């Protein structure tokens, strides 16, 4: 590609980007309200297709909601504060987060059992795993199955 052709392509892409921005602004992009975050202390309407994956997701998300409610924050802020390099300064110490996460997950398993999503014997195993799991290592992602069961 010649230099002149490359400049023409670049100018065309820049013009297209400017037109796109102008159209979005004309349609009221600046007046759009910020998205509202759901309260973690209120039950969320959940419609799942069922299955193991959906059940696990619901237990984890409900558990995060429970922890966030206990910490008086949003689920999103809690999750962002768990990771490193996300730009969120952690407002709680590691022990406080661990207690909130365990309590939220245990309650979530209780609710899943009550709804009939998991049988009692599975809920019992999940509770043992939640009580014994090294939460700090779960957060960091450095955990093996043997850490959970042995």
Image (tube, helix red, strand yellow):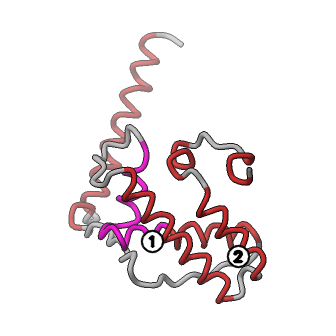
- The crowding category of the residue bearing disc 1, from other C-alpha atoms within 10 Å (few below 14, some 14 to 19, many at least 20), is many
Which residue is drawn at the image coordinates 70% and 43% (left, top)? 144
* Cα–Cα gap, marks 1 and 2: 19 Å
Question: Is 141 left or right of 34, judged from the image as shown?
Answer: right
Q: Is residue 55 or residue 94 the one in the foreground?
A: 94
For marks 1 and 2 on the same chain, the one whose residue lies earlier in the sequence: 1
The residue identified by callout 2 is 123
Q: Is residue 125 or residue 89 the one in the foreground?
A: 125
Question: Is 118 left or right of 42, judged from the image as shown?
Answer: right
Residue 104 in percent (x, y) is at 49, 71
Which residue is drawn at the image coordinates 37% and 43% (left, top)? 86
Q: Is residue 21 above or below residue 36?
A: above
Q: Is residue 142 or residue 35 the one in the foreground?
A: 142
What numbered label is drawn on residue 65? 1
Question: Is 77 covered by the magenta stretch?
Answer: yes
Which residue is drawn at the image coordinates 39% and 54% (left, top)? 95
Q: Which residues are magenta?
A: 64-83
Name the outermost residue toward the top. 2
**What is the secondary structure assignment of the residue under circle 1?**
helix
Residue 2 in percent (x, y) is at 49, 10
Q: Count the numbered circles shown.
A: 2
């Amino acid at each position: 590609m010649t230099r002149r052709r490359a400049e023409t392509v670049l100018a065309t892409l820049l013009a297209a980007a400017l037109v796109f921005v102008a159209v979005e602004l004309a349609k009221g992009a600046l007046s759009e309200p910020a998205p509202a975050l759901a309260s973690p202390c209120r039950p969320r309407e959940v419609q799942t297709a069922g299955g193991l994956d959906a059940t696990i997701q619901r237990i984890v998300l409900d558990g995060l909601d429970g922890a966030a409610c206990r910490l008086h924050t949003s689920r999103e802020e809690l999750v962002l504060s768990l990771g490193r390099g996300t730009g969120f300064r952690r407002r709680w110490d590691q022990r406080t987060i661990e207690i909130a996460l365990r309590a939220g997950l245990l309650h979530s398993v209780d609710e899943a059992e009550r709804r009939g999503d998991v049988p009692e014997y599975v809920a019992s195993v999940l509770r043992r795993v939640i009580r014994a799991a090294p939460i700090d290592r779960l957060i960091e992602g450095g955990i093996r199955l043997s850490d959970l069961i042995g």
